Amino acid sequence: MKNIPWVFLFAVIFFNSCKFNDDPAQCISVLDCGPAGEGWMCVDGACVKESADLDQVSGTDSSNENDSSSLTDDEKEDGATDGSLTDELNDDSGVPDTGADETPDEQTDESSDEISDVIPDETADLSTDETPDETFDDGTPDETADETTVTDGEETPDDDFVSCSTVSKFKNIEAVDLVKAMDICSGVEGTPLLTRADGRNVTCTYQMGCGSEFYQKSVVDVQTAVMEQFGTDSSNAAIKGGTMIALSSGRARDADDTYPTEDDTYEWEAYNAQPPADFTAAHGGSLPTTKTGCKAGEYANDSVMLTVQLKVPATANSFSFNFRFFSQEYKNYTCSQFNDFFIAMLYSGAEGIPEDRNISFDAGGSYISVNSDNFFTVCTPKTGYTCPDGTAGLTGTGYGTTYVDPIGKNGYGGGTKWLTTTAPVVPGETITLKFAIWDTGDTQVDSLVLIDNFRWNLETSTGPVTYECWDTNQNTACDLSEDFNKDGECSERDCYF
């Protein structure tokens, strides 16, 4: 070999490499593709111009691998009509696949589909008629997931978020519709539930309030809604994903919706309905006062409660959601036994969760109600309420017009700005969340809550806390770092981040 000229060896090797390349579109070296100087490249065995999109090599466009346009009409129809909760929720808008190759649990009998009031055993067979979410088997979120990531102490949103709820819905509402509208797009275990606060079905039983066939059959459709906008003020648009949910002790409608909120009182059931037993158990079996010094009320009438069970990602240490509360009890019934509640109850093994499980309260420890005076700031001023945020946020909601209440007093509703509740969790556990609202003491003068933008956080939390949604460092001042959309002010438009 050492006596053979190297030039001759090179020629033989080159000839052998080229003679098997009968297809000019295929190559072994750049010399197979064309004359030098014309910008040809040999990439993965295919000839491409240097300016070409390398994703198009050999005619394959990787961007179309998951494109629904490549499906047949039958495949599209099957996907559109699939009743599987997990299939509907399993997309990149939640915490997506971690790459783990795991086998999902088998489907179970839907006849035992219930969500426990205690922290579920992670080894338990959770009954559901849906296929379990394979992306949550190990609970680990992918770095590209739709969740808040933390870099150098700052929260950074994921620009790749894809919503799993984009259209308003006011009829035939199911709990899963509300869950998705809150941006919970994966990780759901069991079947979400819509009930009264004490677990009963949401039906209309009050004779005067149930006069129409619509209310008799579908009061759940009146007390809940999937919305894109509440009222006409821009502050009441959905924070994230195009939609949000509304729960109400009256009508979950604004002044322009079908069956609008145009009065102060809608009554759906008789008096003496009960609040969640596990909430009142921490208070001796009675409702607590909404604020120190105010009267404690009784009963939880016209209530509605959404319950959902979630698998916590393995790297998540807390979660957050945004909400905004409105009540027509302002101005006439502040600090009274009639003050309606909004509560969010968390069942978790994390430390710092209150005994009554409620995680949404103001800085003074007051429950979310008309008496949360350091949050109840969208209103017309009265003694004890400076209402620094005016009334623009009430426009078109049905909570911003003067009305005559049941005892002849002129009333005018009010509300909070968008708030954020953050609470701790244990990575990998299964938690239960309950969101409930009700009329306290009577069935008159209603309240409503908007909820949106649920997300998992990498950062830890020593206990639940609620704050104005943009105020991430919780110092009540608008800092430059909190003006995420760079419009020169801190507002609900910064709450997405």
Image: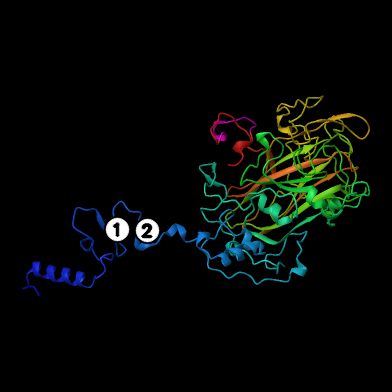
Q: Position of residue 331 (x, y in %)?
A: 84, 30
| Residues packed near mark 2 inside 10 Å, few (<14), some (14 to 19) or many (20 plus) | few
Q: Name the kind of residue labelled 2 in the image.
A: Gln
Which image quadrant is residue 483 in? top right
Q: Position of residue 173 (x, y in %)?
A: 74, 54
Would you place residue 331 above or below residue 460 in this image? above
SS for callout 2? helix
Q: Quadrant of the C terminus?
A: top right
From this viewpoint, is residue 462 visible?
no
> Going 82% across and 24% down the picture, which residue do you hit?
383
Residue identified by numbered label 1: 48
| Residues packed near mark 1 inside 10 Å, few (<14), some (14 to 19) or many (20 plus) | many
Given residues 184 and 78, the one toward you in this image is 78
Asked if labels 2 and 1 touch by Cβ distance under 8 angstroms, the answer is yes
Residue 160 among those drawn in magenta = no
Main SS of the magenta part reads loop
Residue identified by numbered label 2: 56
Horizontal placement of 207 versus 142: left or right?
right
Residue 482 among those drawn in magenta = yes
Horizontal placement of 8 versus 227: left or right?
left
Query: Which region is colored magenta?
Result: 475-483
> Going 70% across and 69% down the picture, which residue do you hit?
125
Given residues 173 and 277, the one toward you in this image is 173
Q: Name the kind of residue labelled 1 in the image.
A: Val
